[in-house]
Image (spheres, rainbow, N blue to C red):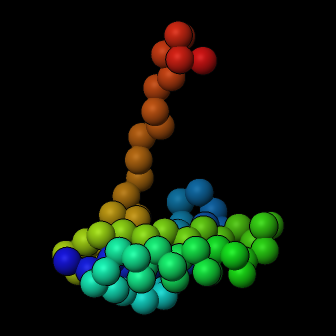
Amino acid sequence: MPYYVFKVTQPTELIKNLSLQDSFEKYRDARELARGIRKELPLDSGTTVKMLFAANQLAAEETLMEKREEKVVLEWEK
């Protein structure tokens, strides 16, 4: 299964724009690309770079588009 590197922009809370940058068979290659893209991005760009390990591009995109529930912070974890 390959590693996929995406640029993710989120203009609103409900909408995510995904832009596939590349896919790699080796983790190290994907990590280097993701780190390189992050270095080039301005801090206030609102763009994040995500790397996923998935069976195919569709599965990777579906994983990124999932709405996750917020983690419940317990009293002693604050």
Q: Residue at x 51, y 79 (%)?
A: 32
Residue found at the very far bottom of the displayed protein: 22
* Residue 69 sits above or below residue 25 on the image: above
Relative image position of residue 71 (x, y in whole percent): 46, 33
Relative image position of residue 55 (x, y in whole percent): 19, 75
* Residue 18 sits above or below residue 72 on the image: below
Q: Residue at x 28, y 84 (%)?
A: 25
Quadrant of res 66: bottom left
* Residue 24 sits above or below residue 38 on the image: below
Quarter of the rendering occupied by the C terminus: top right
Q: Is residue 17 visible?
A: no
In the image: residue 73, left or right of residue 47: left
Q: Is residue 38 visible?
A: yes
Q: Residue at x 48, y 88 (%)?
A: 21
In the image: residue 3, left or right of residue 15: left
In the image: residue 77, left or right of residue 24: right
Q: Residue at x 41, y 52 (%)?
A: 67
In this view of the protein, which residue sits in the foreground, 27 or 77? 27
Relative image position of residue 33 (x, y in whole percent): 52, 82
Quarter of the rendering occupied by the N terminus: bottom left
